[in-house]
Amino acid sequence: MSHPDGLLVNIAAMVEAEQDSQMSLTVVVPGAVITGRLAPEAMWRERVAEVLGDSASLRRFASAFSVTGEPGARPTHLHFHLARILQGSYGIPDTGGMYRVAIAEVSAWSVGAIGYSDE
């Protein structure tokens, strides 16, 4: 989208303001459909930093996730956790991943997570 959807920006702002990670969303971005739950950016960054910190070879990158944006600034990205990229009838990865998506890149979206078949 050349102009981010105002409603989607408002949803992201509510997730940030309420520090809540219960909002399920599915988005279409170039090359992918991502479905999962939104997380506040600080919570998302903390979790990514934990995962990186647990890796001997990636530990040095964990500090990059400790810097946060301006409080009260309008969100420019969606932060997904417990999310999957939908590929045909499968969700990748099985356990859910952590994705950061630019709101300006979202071409379509729907409230709720889309189910998939892992058979």
Image (spheres, rainbow, N blue to C red):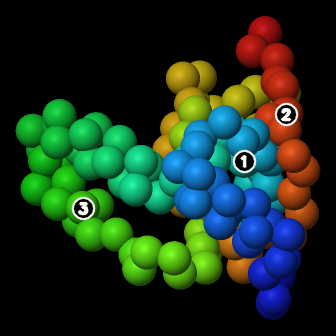
Q: Toward which corner of the image does residue 3 lie, by quadrant?
A: bottom right
Left or right: residue 58 compared with residue 44: left
Query: Badge 1 local density, few (<14 within 10 Å), some, or many (20+)?
Result: many
Q: CA distance from mark 2 to mark 1?
A: 9 Å
Are the residues flagged by discs 2 and 3 in contact, CB closer than 8 Å? no
Estimate the x, y position of residue 15 in percent, counting from the top left: 63, 54
Query: Which of 92 and 68 lies nearest the eye of the viewer?
Result: 68
- Residue 35 visible within the image: no
Q: Toward which corner of the image does residue 68 lie, by quadrant?
A: bottom left
Mark 2 against mark 3, which lies toward the viewer? 3
Q: Is residue 65 above or below residue 43?
A: below
Q: Is tag 2's residue or tag 1's residue first in the polypeptide sequence?
A: 1
Q: CA distance from mark 2 to mark 3?
A: 31 Å
Q: Is residue 48 above or below residue 113?
A: below
Q: Is tag 3's residue or tag 1's residue first in the polypeptide sequence?
A: 1
Estimate the x, y position of residue 41 in percent, counting from the top left: 47, 58
Q: Which residue is mark 3?
A: 66
Left or right: residue 90 compared with residue 89: left
Estimate the x, y position of residue 16 in percent, counting from the top left: 56, 59
Q: Please, what secondary structure does the residue beneath circle 3 have?
A: loop
Q: Quadrant of the C terminus?
A: top right
Query: Badge 3 local density, few (<14 within 10 Å), some, or many (20+)?
Result: few
Q: Amino acid at mark 2?
A: Ile
Are the residues flagged by discs 3 and 1 in contact, CB closer than 8 Å? no
Query: Badge 2 local density, few (<14 within 10 Å), some, or many (20+)?
Result: some
Q: Amino acid at mark 1?
A: Ile
Q: Is residue 53 above or below residue 77?
A: above
Q: Which residue is mark 1?
A: 34
Q: Please, what secondary structure does the residue beneath circle 1 have?
A: strand
Q: Please, what secondary structure does the residue beneath circle 2 have?
A: loop
Q: Which residue is mark 2?
A: 114
Q: Toward which corner of the image does residue 28 lie, by quadrant?
A: bottom right
